[in-house]
Image: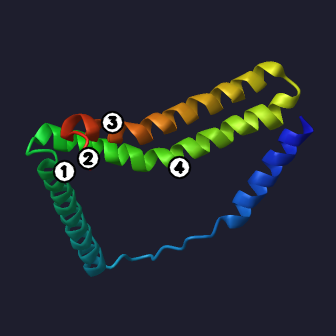
Amino acid sequence: MKKILTFITILITVVLLSITPVFAETQPVLEEKEVLESDNATKLSQMKEETGGKLEQYTEKYGGSKAYGITAMILDTIRIYSIPFCFVGIAIGAIYQYIIGIRRLDIRDRGFNLIIAFVTILVISQVLPLVFAIVTRGWVL
């Protein structure tokens, strides 16, 4: 219990020391606001064009089928974002198993199960795009 309280106290202290004050102006300038809104609209349209370009590339790559292109793009996005998500989950499972689970066996088992689950999710999300490419396009050397 002392370890948990010490960890929480240190975490709160670090968070409070890292917070910086933000000062606002009393009168907002309308010109800057209009420029920011136009910049946001420009960025949004650029992101839409980039995504459309990626979708067209995947559609061409998978034989002109739009469904295959969308599926490949989604699987690729999942492949990229699953790595940090699963590493955080594995770290949480390790904390449960090796730090909190020293005293209680049920929490230790929960940590082990979390580690197994996140490793399984990581492996599946990394292998699934490869399996999809092999099934749809065939084994091309």
**Mark 1 or mark 2: which comes first in sequence?**
1
Mark 3 or 2, which is nearer the eye?
Answer: 3
Q: Position of residue 6 (x, y in %)?
A: 87, 46
Disc 1 marks a residue whose amino acid type is Tyr
Give the alpha-carbon distance from disc 4 to disc 2, as whole Å. Answer: 19 Å
Give the alpha-carbon distance from disc 3 to disc 4, as whole Å. Answer: 22 Å
Q: Which residue is mark 3?
A: 131
Q: Secondary structure at mark 3?
A: helix
Q: Are marks 4 and 2 in contact (CB under 8 Å)?
A: no
Give the alpha-carbon distance from disc 1 to disc 2, as whole Å. Answer: 7 Å
Q: Are marks 3 and 1 in contact (CB under 8 Å)?
A: no
Q: Residue furthest front?
A: 141
Give the alpha-carbon distance from disc 3 to disc 2, as whole Å. Answer: 14 Å
**Mark 3 or mark 2: which comes first in sequence?**
2
Mark 4 or 1, which is nearer the eye?
Answer: 1
Disc 2 marks a residue whose amino acid type is Met
Q: Which residue is mark 2?
A: 73
Nearest to the observer: residue 99 or residue 63: 63
- 97 left or right of 130? right
Q: Secondary structure at mark 1?
A: helix
Tag shown at residue 58: 1
Q: Which residue is mark 4?
A: 84
